[in-house]
Image: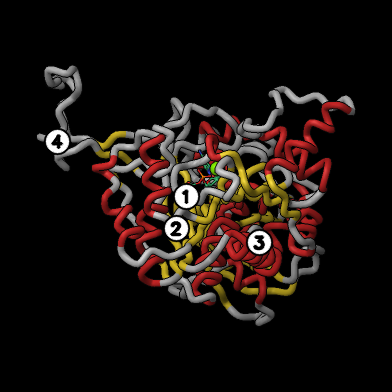
Amino acid sequence: MQTIKRTRILDVLKSSEFGTTVNVKGWVRTRRGSKSVNFIALNDGSTIKNVQIVADVEKFGEETLKQITTGACLSVVGTLVESVGSGQNCEIQATEIEILGTCGSDYPMQKKGQSFEFMRQHAHMRLRTNTFGAVFRIRHNMAIAIHKYFHEHGFYYFHTPIITASDCEGAGQMFQVTTKNLYDLKKGEDGKIDYSDDFFGKQTSLTVSGQLEGELGATALGAIYTFGPTFRAENSNTPRHLAEFWMIEPEVAFNDITDNMDLAEDFIKYCVRWALDNCKDDLDFLNKMIDKTLLDRLHFVVEHDFVRLPYGEGIRILEEAIKNGHKFEFPVYWGVDLASEHERYLVEEHFKRPVILTDYPKEIKAFYMKLNDDGKTVRAMDVLFPQIGEIIGGSEREENYDKLMSRIEELHIPMKDMWWYLDTRKFGTCPHSGFGLGFERLILFVTGMQNIRDVIPFPRTPKSADF
Ligand code: 4AD
Ligand code: MG
């Protein structure tokens, strides 16, 4: 085989240097043809589009061509020629074909139209399908957009620990990290496990959020963001929950809740606009195959202001809806933690646009949120999106040492673990705010996919940690 530098199919398809010799490598999507000529659709993952390889049957022989089945991996050298068929600008007239890897009929991604459930069971191979290729190219682009946005806006990327001894959200949904021998756990006289001889000398877990350490960063560097994996042992088997998900958490000194809302809205619009500007082929594909309203929804979000509304008002609207005959599965009353159906009613049916709900009852929010003057509500903000429900959760933080302490005591949060966090309120405290965006929820929104398990390459959910 001639040694020519490989060209990505993305670049080949953009080229109009007809007559030149190129080398492409990739996986066969389909092969079809007549007695004299075969057409091979080859994809290398650089784009949703395939390049068409034209192979002369007499030249390559039936026996060789028969091995070129769906999923096989090829290296092809050939001449770039202008395509006569519609749909593409060019194709490759093959001069040499090397089969790098054959692919048997037991290849699980054979057929078209497999269910997403089937593909989840073969998550290691689903990456090679059009849909998952599109989703993961978009996922990459969203990560780039996030870093670009914050870099351009003067934020520093701040790395917070994954192993931690504190429970940021206080929900007790943490995965423990230990090197203790689980077959021989010694307990103290009080019946509790003694962690003093454990690796860290205390009980540790995988983090549920980088926020607490993020606040330390923001009150030193001014504006930071985290972007890393977070873990929640919540037994929620829903299409919107993962046990391991990625979160983006900006935190800004001197920002109040209004600045925080402005940042959230501007940031999320930037990301969606980035997708529209940089992922056109993949979005067109998803709009055609997965959700025909996807592009309209993305444009709508970019072009319209989000509604901003106190929680109490939201409850009033939901109660009104019930009076007018709307049925919800879960009850609605002041103080309730809104269910996804309530959030989606407000967004999809009542306002028909994204909503930022603020000023939630303190009982349903975390300890660190700033208490309002009413003594009942906190300066929380959840951004609610069509099809998704909550996409962002955030707040202005309680910067007053005494008020924060009394919340910590009310909630019986172990003080000895929090001393370093409280120091921010002791030494030069300042107003500050931040939020967390669930990366996979953003990808769900931008791709139109229905299940969060289908927007992360290898999902971790209750009873499922394959691959
Ligand atoms: O609302 P949450 O729990 O907020 C926090 O963790 C704060 N510490 C954030 C902050 O203020 N810095 O989570 C933030 C977001 C949610 O809005 C949701 O998008 C996502 O993280 N999220 C999940 N995504 C997937 N699976 C789960 N189990 C999730 N739990 C939260
Ligand atoms: Mg939340």
Label located before the other in sequence (4 or 3) = 4
Label located before the other in sequence (2 or 1) = 2
Label located before the other in sequence (4 or 2) = 4
**Relative to 203, 398 lies left or right:** right
| Labelled pair 2, 1 in contact (Cβ < 8 Å) | yes
Question: How many residues crowd around disc 2 within 10 Å: few (fewer than 14), some, or many (20 or more)?
Answer: many
**Relative to 41, 248 lies left or right:** left
Question: How many residues crowd around disc 3 within 10 Å: few (fewer than 14), some, or many (20 or more)?
Answer: some
- Residue where numbered disc 2 is placed: 227
Front disc: 4 or 1: 4
Picture quadrant where residue 412 is located: top left
- Give 299 or 39, whichever is nearer the viewer: 299
Q: Locate residue 126, reporting x and y percent.
A: 55, 42
Label located before the other in sequence (4 or 1) = 4
Q: Which mark is residue 265?
A: 3
- Give 196 or 162, whichever is nearer the viewer: 196
The amino acid marked with disc number 2 is: Phe
| Labelled pair 4, 2 in contact (Cβ < 8 Å) | no
The amino acid marked with disc number 4 is: Asp
Picture quadrant where residue 275 is located: bottom right
Where 41 sits versus 172, above or below?
Answer: below
Label 4 – label 3 distance at C-alpha = 44 Å
SS class, disc 3: helix
- Residue where numbered disc 4 is placed: 198
Quadrant of the image containing the N terminus = bottom left
| Labelled pair 2, 3 in contact (Cβ < 8 Å) | no
Label 2 – label 3 distance at C-alpha = 18 Å
Q: Locate residue 405, reporting x and y percent.
A: 36, 46
Front disc: 2 or 3: 3
